[in-house]
Amino acid sequence: MRLVFIPLDAPEPPALPAPLRLLQLSGSSMGCSWQVQFYLPACHPQQQAAFWQNGIQQELDLVVQQMSHWEAGSDLSRFNQATAGSVCTLAPEFCTVMDYAIYLARQTEGAYDPAAGKLVNLWGFGPAKNRHEPARRPSEAAIAEVLTQPGWRDLQLNRLRRELLQPGGLSLDLSSIAKGFAVDQVAAFLERHAIPSYLVEVGGELRGFGIKPDHMPWWVRIETPPVHAQSPTPMNWDGLVALHGLAIATSGSYRQFFEQDGRQYSHTLDPRNGYPVDNNLVSVTVLHKECMIADALATAFTVMGEQAALDYADSHQIACCLMCQSASGLQVRLSRTMQAMLDT
């Protein structure tokens, strides 16, 4: 079954000047690959592919420099190592991400937690001291100890001064939002240079705008779990989104995990109890104008579980698609806003 989703309130796509040149660029950042496709008008003052390649890479490098928990010299890593009571002045981009991350943590009562860095490291999904060691289930005592340390409730951000207080021992991890923000940064770079049609992808998170010369939008397929992650039968479902003025992000329990003693542990942790998520959600896809928000919400919804995620999505007019495990196989549930996008 194929379902087609159309943006509800996107602006009219701009007319494409002729002639046009399609540029397809790629690279790597944040431990993953990126790809950008866009149509470059022949009259545009910047025609060299190197200009666009370098400009896109600089936008991504800026996010890494500020928000990577893997880079020892990043702004985030310096904050994590700062002494108790230190006040760190954030770059504007870092402040924007932290502002929304703290907001979402409060909205979801900690289901989304930008201060879960120590918990992520404890489970072996972060920049641990020895990355050659496989991830292992930590002891209950170790988990309990991490949960007693400062967390999202202790984050104090002065937005006007862009100052963030380090209460002491708090470790930020923005891996579930920074990649989405990076997509937005690249999109903003293209829009500043008057690009009328583009598709940006970083590590599976996407944002699109405009139409192509054939007057079709950038069609993007909603990610479905691989066959081995589905039981007992594969899904007969196919969702296509017209990605004009929209971003799409997906979180899935099948993407990264480890097995121990015959049990599978997801990389998505519930920061409220310290353990990997254990619910019937297999995949969560969120659509939003900002990829930063879609990225963070996809993680939050995965932690919250099926009904709580749908309740939040419906009360905040969020378009989301949940793929849930049931006795008969995977079932798809759509929020009301997502249902309204169906092309009937």
Image (cartoon, rainbow, N blue to C red):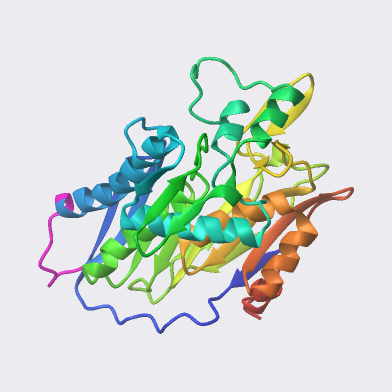
Residue 277, position as x, y percentages in the image: 73, 41
75 relative position to 110: left or right: left
Residue 100, position as x, y percentages in the image: 50, 60
- In the rendered image, the quadrant that contains the C terminus is bottom right
Whether residue 62 appears in magenta in the rendering, the answer is no
Q: Quadrant of residue 61?
A: top left
Identity of the residue drawn at 37% across and 36% down: 78
Identity of the residue drawn at 36% across and 57% down: 162
247 relative position to 94: left or right: right
Identity of the residue drawn at 55% across and 55% down: 296
Q: Quadrant of residue 191?
A: bottom left
Magenta residues (range): 41-50
Residue 67, position as x, y percentages in the image: 39, 44
Residue 308 visible in rendering: yes
Image position of 169 with respect to 324: above or below: above
Return the residue nearer the eye: 186 or 195: 186
Specify the principal SS of the magenta part.
loop
Return the residue nearer the eye: 180 or 273: 273
Whether residue 45 appears in magenta in the rendering, the answer is yes
Identity of the residue drawn at 53% across and 76% down: 7
Residue 208, position as x, y percentages in the image: 41, 65
Q: Residue furthest right?
A: 327
